[in-house]
Amino acid sequence: MNTPQAGILLPLPPRARYLSFVPDAGEGAADCLQALAKVADGERTVVGLGRSLLSALAVDIGGLRPFPSLAGAGVELPATPAAIWVWLRGEDRGELLQRARRIERLLAPAFRLAETLDAFVHDGGRDLSGYEDGTENPVGDAATAAAIVGAERPSLAGSSFVAVQRWLHDLARFEQMPPDDRDLCIGRRRRDNEEIDDAPESAHVKRTAQESFTPPAFVLRRSMPWTEGPRGGLLFVAFATSFDPFEAQLRRMVGIEDGIVDALFRFTRPQSGAYFWCPAMRAGRLDLSPLRL
């Protein structure tokens, strides 16, 4: 029986390292994937596969599509596809480094490491802006229903689809905003995380309220703050049974529906955007049977 990669549903780890791989000049992609499947336990090492990789293998996973390059008034969302995405979960930065190096060596015959990003839990689960992240996340059975493909799609049961964006914050600009403006930008008070009923329609909370869409746009957020030298932001990660809920939220954020752009863009912008399919687990390893491997 297939089960989800456990790390998708578990609480966030204290630390993480994200790896993105692109095809290299070498051959043997299938062999590399099978080697990765043996070491990825789905709990401390979560794996997602990109559309370009599956196309190269001449297989199709229904629902896996290119990341949309959306734009609104003064905002543009980049698409930066990759072949393989790996989320390393742990506690010790040294151990994460060593695990990342082992995976890089396994994939080296056919793939090149394109990006490495270190992330962490900040202040009990807050973004670097100081606001609590993922307040509206579904929990328990609702989280599983939102993030994990069910038995109604037997060939994909236990798998998940994940949207990944690296957001870069302009913290200096954010700090220059009056505290009340910051709260209205988010739609919640930072001091107590209470939603502001009369916040403007541009407030992030109002732009992305999952139950306000038809159908409801529920995703399971597993985002983590990141820093690199003086820069920092949020690695936005959202798991779902399809990309439809995420895209519904994204389209509203850039104002495609009504011309109202999410106030979040006043101090942060995405630098990347990619979609991946996360295989289910079977007998302690990634189940690559939908890829005919």
Image (cartoon, rainbow, N blue to C red):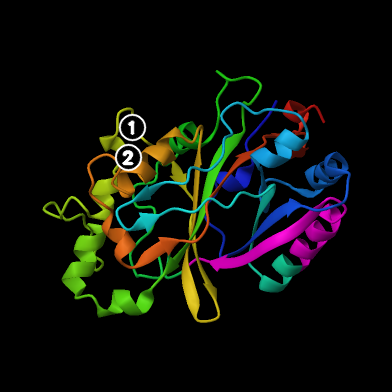
Q: Residues within 10 Å of mark 1 (few under 14, many from 20)?
A: few
Which residue is depicted at the point 88% across and 46% down? Answer: 27
Expressed as whole percent of the image width and height from the top left, the position of residue 155 reads 66, 21
Camera-side residue of 216 and 123: 216
Vertical comparison of 197 with 224: above or below: above
Residue 97 placed where, x, y %? 73, 69
x, y (%) of residue 152? 55, 18
User: Gap between marks 2 and 1, in whole Å?
Assistant: 6 Å
Q: Is residue 144 visible?
A: yes
State the mark number for residue 216: 1
Is 250 situated above or below 180?
above
- Let me know if residue 125 appears in the view: no
Q: Amino acid at mark 2?
A: Gln
Amino acid under disc 1: Pro
Q: Residue at x 64, y 41 (%)?
A: 5
Question: Closer to the camera, 260 or 244?
Answer: 260
**Number of the label disc, if any, that sits on residue 210:** 2
Quadrant containing the C terminus is top right
Asked if marks 2 and 1 touch (Cβ < 8 Å), the reply is yes
Tell me what residue is drawn at x 65 percent, y 33 percent. 3
Start-end of magenta stretch: 98-121
Image height of 103 relative to 229, above or below: above
**Is residue 42 rendered to the left or right of residue 180?**
right
Question: Which residue is found at the position 69% from the left and 48% from the top?
Answer: 84
Q: Check if residue 111 falls in the magenta segment.
A: yes
Name the quadrant containing residue 106: bottom right
Q: Quadrant of the N terminus?
A: top right
**Residue 194's spot in the image, x, y percent?**
21, 57
Mark 2 surroundings: few (<14), some (14-19) or many (≥20) residues within 10 A: many
Left or right? Give the position of 180 relative to 292: left
Q: Is residue 279 magenta?
A: no
- Indicate left or right for 80 with 212 as reference: right
